Structure formats: C-alpha cells, structure tokens
Amino acid sequence: MPFPIELKFTTPHLFQGRAQSITLYSGLTQIVGPNGSGKSQILRHLKSVLPQYAGSRHVKYLSSARLAALDVYRAIDTRHRSEPYYEGVPQGIRLDLLEGGEYKIETAASAFYTLKNRPDLQVKIRERLRALFKRDIKFQWTAQGLNIDFNRIGEGTYSLSMEASGLLHVITILTSIFDEKIGVLLVDEPELSLHPQLQAFLLREMKAYSGDPSGTCKKIIVIATHSTSMISVRTVEDISNIIFTIDANESPRQISPDNDTLKNRKLKAFVSQIGAYKDVFFTSHPLLVEGPSDALIAEALEQKYNLYLGAAGSQVLPTLSKDSMPGAAKLMKLIGKCPVVMADLDGFTDSDNLVSIFSGDPQAEELVQRQGHESLIRYVHQVKDALANLIDNRWDEISSKAKEHSYWVDVNEENIEIRKKRSAVAVLLAMSEPEASSLLSCEWIGLRHRLIALLDILEAAGCFFLRRGTIENYYQNTPVDISRRADKIKYAEVEAVSIIESEQSVITQQYEDILKVLRFAARSPEIDEVAAIKELILSVVAPAMVRLATSNNHDLQNTVNRILGEDAGTIKLEKIGDDKKTILRVSLKSEILNIAGLPIDLPQDCDPVQFLNERLVSR
C-alpha cells in the first residue's frame, strides 16, 4: 500500500458540514491546532475510514481521557471518605468485556490487558521501564480481576494506582506502538503528563514503528498534539506530514509536497533551522523578522513593555535573510497562519516579492480603493514609478541628505541605482513634516506623502517595513561598521541590554516603529467582563423599574430569577429610599467579579440604558 493515502470524511457539526479531505504522506501524521478546532473529532472520524488501510489488522484509538477512570477512583473512593486511596484499586478489567474487544476500548485498561497476555510485549515494555525509570512491572490474576503492580528496582512492590500518571501514559502508548496486531494507531494528546524528554522518546518510537502496515509490523500512526516535542520538522517535506486545524468552522490546512512554495531553495534553508522555533506551528500570527539581530531587539522590547506575544498567539521568528522572508510568509499563510512581517526598508524598495504576499488582503485592498486606486499592487507600482522618475530627474535635490544614510555608504551593494532608491526612501521617511517642507521640493514632498500612505496601508495588513532602513538605524549608539554578521549580533546583544536598562520614555521615542509592529502582533481578543455583566443588568432593570413603586425586594429578586434563570445568582436588586425618592440598587452576588461602578443606584426616572452605559465603561 503506497503512500500517499487520501482520506475523505464529513462531520456534520464541524467545518460547516463540508466534506473534508486530508492526505497521509507517510506513516506518521501530526494534527496541530488550538483547542476546539476539531483535532479530536478528526481522529475519531479517521477511526471509521482507516480500517481498509490497516492491513487486515486492528484500528486502535487512545483518547486523551485514557486514565480518567483510575484518576476518579484515586480521588473520590467513598470507602475512604475524601482522602485519596491508592492501595488495592480494582482495575475494572473484566475478561468478558475485554477478551476479543480490547482493541475497541480507548483507555489504558486495554493496554494492560494486552500486556498480560503478551510476554513478548512485556519484554519490550519492561526493558524500557528499567532503562528510563528504574521500574519493573508485574501482572497477577486475582478473584477481583487483573492486578498490576510496580516496583522500583531494589525496593518494594506497590499498586499501579500509586504510580505516576506519566509512566502509565507511556506504558499505554508504547504497548499500542509495539503491538503488531494494530495496523492503525490514533492517539489524542500523547504528551499528557510527560516531561519533554519523554515526549521526544515517544516520538522516536513512533517514527521507528510507523509506515506501511501491509505485511509488516509497522503501522499508520496519527496523533493530535499541543506539544512542540511531538512534532519534528527538519526538511520542507516534513511539513506535509502536519495537518493544521484553524477553528471549528474552517477546513484544516495541509501542504502537498508538490507545492511550488516548498521547492523554493531559500525556503528550504529557512525550514532547516525552524526546528528551534517549533512554537510557530502553534501560533495564530507569527512575527517574521529578517535575522537574529532583529529578533534580539524585538524580544528585548517585548520584555521591556510586557507585551506577552506568546499569550496573544504570536512568536518572533527570524527568517535568516530578506530573500527567504517572502517564502516564509507564504508558507505561514498556506498552513492557515496570519503572519506579521517586520522587514528592512530595502525589502520594499528592491522587490515586490514581500508586498505581493499581502496583495489581496481585504482590509488593505479596501483602504487602497478608498483612496481611489485599483489595487494594492498597482498602487505600489505607481509609487515606485514616481520614485524612479524623481531619482532620474531630481536626484540632486535630495542627494546630500541621502548620501549620509547607511544605505548609501553600504560597501556590500555595488549597484548605484539600488543605493539611490534605498537611501532616498529612507531619508524621506525619516524627515519630520516641518523638515520636509523646508528642505524638499513639492514633488518630493508629494512622493513622501504617498509613501507614508502606502506603508500605512501595508501595515494594516500586517506588513511592516522599518522606515529608518534597518534595525541598526534605530540603535541608541549607532555602530560605525557592522557589515559582518558576527558584529551585527554582538552590537544587537549590547543594544538589547541597553533597552532593558534605559528609561522607557527614551526607548518609546527611539523605537516607535518597532513597538508599533510588536503591539500589532500582540493584539488579542479583549476580555470584557464589564460588557457581559452590563448585558445581564440591562435585561432585568427595565422590567424592575416599571414596577419599582409597588415592588419589594422579594418581588425584585423574583424578576431577576424569572428573566435570568441560571444566571440569576449573579445579580442582586434592592429597593431603597422612600416614597418621595425611590432608587433601584444593583449589585453583584460574587466575590470574584470586580466591576468598577458597582453597586450602582438608578433613580426611578432615569433612562437605564443611558445611565448604565455612562457609568459602567469597559476598560
């Protein structure tokens, strides 16, 4: 049975009910994505479509709750009151239920039953337990069923229920990996309770035993994971073995090995070093920067300003060079990410490759069309044509300023026309409005305005160019010569320390452009408890106000209970004042909700919507 294997399935409650197609390009496939994006459901549906590829062997699914029954028993065995109970736990393994059906059960119980009947599997498991954990395992039938005991080598014996959960997960998964009667193994979150080194060990065993299940001991293995230690990306071909889920409404993404993007030579170099940044596969909008110097400065600013990129679904990812950045950005888009890029200004002046990745962005195209242009890419060409025309005909008007910029003195660039474009755009963008008005002709001023407007539009799409030129042009103490890569990193390390130690007001002014990029990447959905509480309050205060004059506190709370149902335990209404001035007091019956402005008193004659909107304001 040769790979690839195309699998089609439909889940009525996922991906808007659309038919889905995923492809297994090798024996090991990983599904990654955020919580609630459908990973576990995909695994369950694969259980029904993969039997024909199992080589007349079993399809085994291990759920993420594979130890749930044991954990519950440990915690709440009623014979021992509320204290955890560890000795003599019945494993719940009944022969009449498991015999012949152990491959249908999704929990650890089936693995231990299989082990009891397979001395050869016991050898493989025992040797790994001894090598990794200094443990041994013993199986014994009793009147209550199968008992499983462990002992630390050289010490006494103890019950399975006293063993660490991580070790039990390892035994469960390894048993299924080694069992040659299983042709397809599906594992939900194999990393549970495991140290990263153990996760890497499990991944190695999965790789060794994954492959074509027809006529061999190998098996198709598909896992759903949140762990970087459970994925391996060393070549561009490895990316095709990862399925990326986005959310429950959007179809999963997967890249074919034949995709032209993966054949890009510079992208192959980029992917070869992405193993150190595997977190990027678990982000929603990675921040791509050109190299290690940019990454050092970005990370220092993130720390200085407490921006928490990781919590917002982002991560700084250096792409080695400006030439590999377009391919890296395109790759991120293909796997369902929304990349944010921070590139040197010459990434804009020298080529359209990076800009074209963001061409078609709905927000950017709308902004361009509002300014009367046909499309983003046409607007870019118009601005660049105007730049070329001014350099050809009016270079002398800006040359003295341009020749002071590092782009002009760059000994690595011999093409004089490229140096002119780079340095001209850099000095135009670096000038203040008053400075530009006093030094430039109206033609250059007009081009400057168009450049700024264009870059603003690109930034709305997540494409940022450093307006001063390169990251080194922002340093507080600009180095004289940093043409060598080693010198660039050394100066960046010094500057990163300076950023942390300097006054924030100084850094804010110096690094305004980079901070704008980081804040864009760090944006995340607002958590607005005020809006949620205000919605509940508004649903009850209007009916309560209508009958306020004739109601008592019991009546008011009945109104809350009737309207809010299960949410009624949050809101408390009280009538205060006298016949001359009656007020409705609204407060919260919660110690964990801290809403500024509550409790609040509403006069009987007020407009409750306006009154509450003015006083309960979201942060």
Image: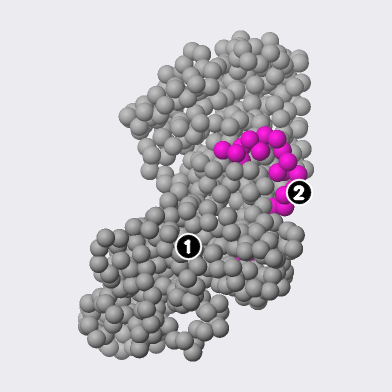
Seen in the image, is 499 located left or right of residue 385?
A: left
Q: Is residue 269 magenta?
A: yes
**Colouring:** one colour
Residue 216 shows up from this direction: yes
- Point 70% across, 26% down: residue: 350
Image height of 515 relative to 423, above or below: below
Marks 2 and 1, the one that precedes in the sequence = 1
Q: Which residues are magenta?
A: 247-273
Height in image: 197 above or below 1?
above
Q: Is residue 220 found left or right of 198 in the rendered image?
A: right
Mark 2 residue type: Asp
Q: Residue at x 60, y 63 (%)?
A: 221
User: Depth check: 441 or 94 in front?
Assistant: 94
* Residue 453 drawn in magenta: no
Nearest the viewer among 446 and 64 is 64
**Identity, as a three-letter code, of the amino acid under mark 1:** Lys
